[in-house]
Amino acid sequence: MTDLHLWLIPLVPVAGFLVNGLFGRRFPKALVTAVAIVAAAVPMLQVASIVYRFSSLTRPFIESHGTWIAAGAFHASFAFQLDQLSMVMLCVVTGVGFLIHVYSIGYMGEEEGYWRFFAYMNLFLFFMLTLVLSANFLLMFVGWEGVGLASYLLIGFYYTRDSASNAGKKAFLYNRVGDVGFLLAMFLLIAHFGTLNFSDVFGAIGSNPAMHGGILTAIGLLLLLGAVGKSAQIPLYVWLPDAMEGPTPVSALIHAATMVTAGVYMIARAHIIYDRSAIALLTVASIGTATALLAATMGMMQNDIKRVLAYSTVSQLGYMFLGCGVAAYSAGVFHLVTHAFFKALLFLAAGSVIHTLGGEQDMRAMGGLRTKIPVTFWTMTAAVFAISGFPPLCGFVSKDEILYQAFVHSEAGKVFWAVGLLTAGLTSFYMFRLWYMTFFGESRAVAYEEAAVHARHDTKLTLEAEHAHHVHESPKSMLVPMTILAILCVIAGGLGWPEGLGGTNWFSHFLAPAVSGAHLQYEPVRVALATGGIGASATNQAPAPANNLEIILAIVSTLVALSGWCAAHLMYYKRRDLPARLTARFHAIYSLVFNKYWVDEIYGALVVAPVLFIARWVLAALVDRGVIDGGGLLAGCTAQGFGSLAARIQSGNIRSYAGWLAAFAALLLVAVYFGWTTHFGIR
Amino acid sequence: MVPISWYLILSAILFSIGVAAFLIKRNIITVFMSIELMLNAVNLTFVAFAQQWHVISGQIFVFFVMVVAAAESAVGLAIIIAVFRARSTLNVDQVDVMKL
Amino acid sequence: MHLALFLVFGGLCVAGALNLLLQSHPINSSLSLVVVMSSLAVLYLLLGAEFLAAAQVIVYAGAIMVLFTFVIMLLNAGREERTRGSKMAYAIGFPGAAVLLCLLAYIFISHSGDFARVHVGEYVVSTAALSGVLFRDLLLPFEVTSILILIAILGAVALARKEH
């Protein structure tokens, strides 16, 4: 088993992209579907076979496919690497990706750009797999940029809508701002280590125990900037809510499960840099916690079902950052995995609801769907309980692990724990609010429609006859992936059940060689994976847990989640008038949060307006028209001027010609005689 | 015993007078005659140098110059006649059709 | 003796050239030019070019200048009118000519040490010697020259013909 053919994993999706992209317009729908599903299934099967045959790995397996850049002492190659961390990411990306592809068959079935959608989805898979598999920062950056591109294409899928294309541009630009950080970090790495290979850089840091702070802090903070852009943290999170303009499967795959987690993956991958820099770690944790709280408050007020889920994603990503920021990388990555399950399921279920209601996304127009679409209801219930952190579902396990690790990490960690706990309460509240508003009570659809006569601005699907529309369950192609994800939500917790609560925490031990501090011998091998039992020599970074503390903390977080549920139950089931009365009483605060703290407007005034001003008046008018056009005009006019001056020699008068002749003959003779030409020298 | 440089200076003077006449005179034929003057000045230079180096090729050159000058003056005068027929003037300043 | 001859006939050359410049009627200019040509023939003799002196008188003074005179009389050229020509000719032409003269004079005077003195009769090229070179070594150019003259005749006849 020496050759894993890792290159095949990203290659099949890109082949699918090319086939569907180039010829999909003319293919029948079945063929487009077949190509796309095969292109998504083959990587999943290959990853499954790798997992099945996997025994243990103490060092990463690197597969190099030729040199890309060879410039002096700097080399970069097309190299893929496989270790525990990339295996986890591969499973998530290919597994969830495949399920969402299947879901899209039903959801996007009546769309015009069906072939285009699947082409872009396959393209996204290719770039995401490249990102996860790459063995150096440069190839990872290729994947990084590529998923940004795919995200832009997919967010702006309904390109005829202004809001959609604007949202796509916004996403891409905010990603770009973060990418500056990534690029600068890469430049620093090249300057300091002379290479971008993970093994070389991390090996150099590892074999130098005295290296702390300084340049590592700089690199860590710059990488963090990149992660902040890609994973929608403060201050670059504003693109993610707008990204909901894209179709729901896109939101599920890209903006919940995979692309936005690339930042977390990168921090986990470069963990050794962060381990050596306390400042960077603290920054990661602070940003994560602050974002989690901020986004949770904003999610409480939104009325669009997808916006709530978007803010929820931002908030949960904050948790992952918090996990990494307290050096509990395996906890952060485990939350990444569980979040992929329940958030993707939430989006898919929301999509199912939207599909059922013929395009309605406003929760104020929903209600009473519990009995009409039972499968959607029960799968969404599983996801809601998971994200709120109720044991024994997966969300509880991962979130609780992060909070526990934060608590025991340091004094600052206790503050993070407290904020995280509050956020968990808020999360539970707004998720159950969503649950109640969508499924329970009387159907408010007709009433809302009479109240708001204007066209729903968020509809994407071709509207069926609204009043004659009757609510029915979604097709099997949509329900089966949702069911699978729901089952995973329930049982995945067992993978990482913490030792403090009586489990084995298999996940943490599995991931340990890749993210632990003991992984200092970071050398690549091109031979077979090491045989033998699962390498359990390296343990988790955290100290041995005190059982009692962990149990107490787990109980506290469960109680907080329960209280969130109760509050939501009170406000949205028992006494429906309560929300309106509270918003009236606290109007100022409500208005502030409802308008997302005016962050978009602040950015618009602080950043966008000056840039536009500079672009329009300085660069366009002054530099472009003035200097550049003017320069060209100047050159032209000068030439014309000289030309017209010179043309006056051609007067037609013989005597003037003779005069010119005599003068220049004299000049030539003088030049020749005094040696100004090299050929003659009378002297 | 006259130094050869005197002959050369004489030819330089003749040449310059020819150039001056070319620039001053307004009659085409006179302008043409100044060209002949210039050619003669050059001939004198050639012969002087032939005497200086005791070579015959200077005088050969003068021979050919004379022949070519003869041919050129024949054709040139024919052209002047044609121009006179076309423009009825021998004034150089009024033959200025070829200008921009 | 040589010096006297040189001064006299050199002076005649310059005087004739200046007269060509200063006269207003072209016929006077052409007659002055004849004087120049003849003086030059004498100077050629002093420089030992017998054949050339004869050719100068026969071809230049005797044929070319006659041709000029005939054309002047044919075209009934009168005194020159004073017309506004170009300022350029005076503005840069004269300085150019002056520079030429000064430069040439300077060259010849500064290098006068490199030049020998003419001893009349020391080096005389006989017609036989000249024709020997012409008809032996330079036969081709000689024949080509005759064709040139033929072409010139044809051209002159074609150009000067009266239009029907």
Image (cartoon, coloured by chain):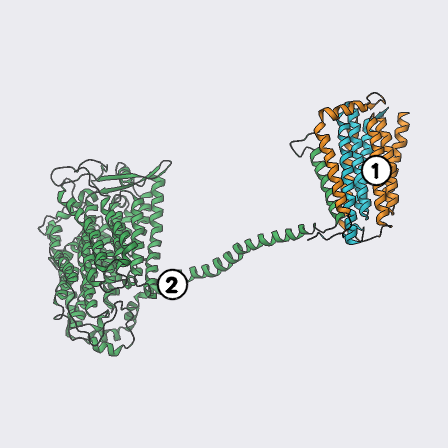
Task: Tell me the element at label 1.
Answer: helix
Task: Tell me the element at label 2.
Answer: helix
Q: Is residue A293 above or below residue A677?
A: below
The answer to the question of whether label 2 and label 1 lie on touching residues, with beta carbons closer than 8 A, is no
Q: Is residue A432 above or below residue C55?
A: below
User: Relative to A226, is A652 on the left or the right?
Assistant: right
Q: Which residue is mark 1?
A: C63
x, y (%) of residue A87? 19, 46
Q: Is residue A253 visible?
A: yes
Give me the residue at 36% from left, 44% from top. A187
Amino acid carrying mark 2 in the image: Gly
- Residue positioned most to the front: C164
How many numbered badges does the structure rendering display?
Answer: 2
Query: Which of C127 and B56 lies nearest the eye of the viewer?
Result: C127
- Neighbours of disc 2 within 10 Å: few (<14), some (14-19), many (20+): some
The shade of chain C is: orange
Write down the quadrant of residue A440 in the picture.
Answer: bottom left
Query: Which of A21 and A426 lies nearest the eye of the viewer?
Result: A21
The shade of chain B is: cyan
Mark drawn on residue A604: 2
Mark 2 or 1, closer to the camera: 1
Query: Which of A72 and A681 lies nearest the eye of the viewer?
Result: A681
User: Relative to C78, is A441 on the left or the right?
Assistant: left
x, y (%) of residue C11? 88, 34
Chain letter of the residue carrying label 1: C
Quadrant containing the C terminus of chain A is top right
Chain shown in green: A
- Neighbours of disc 1 within 10 Å: few (<14), some (14-19), many (20+): some
Distance between the Cα atoms at labels 2 and 1? 97 Å
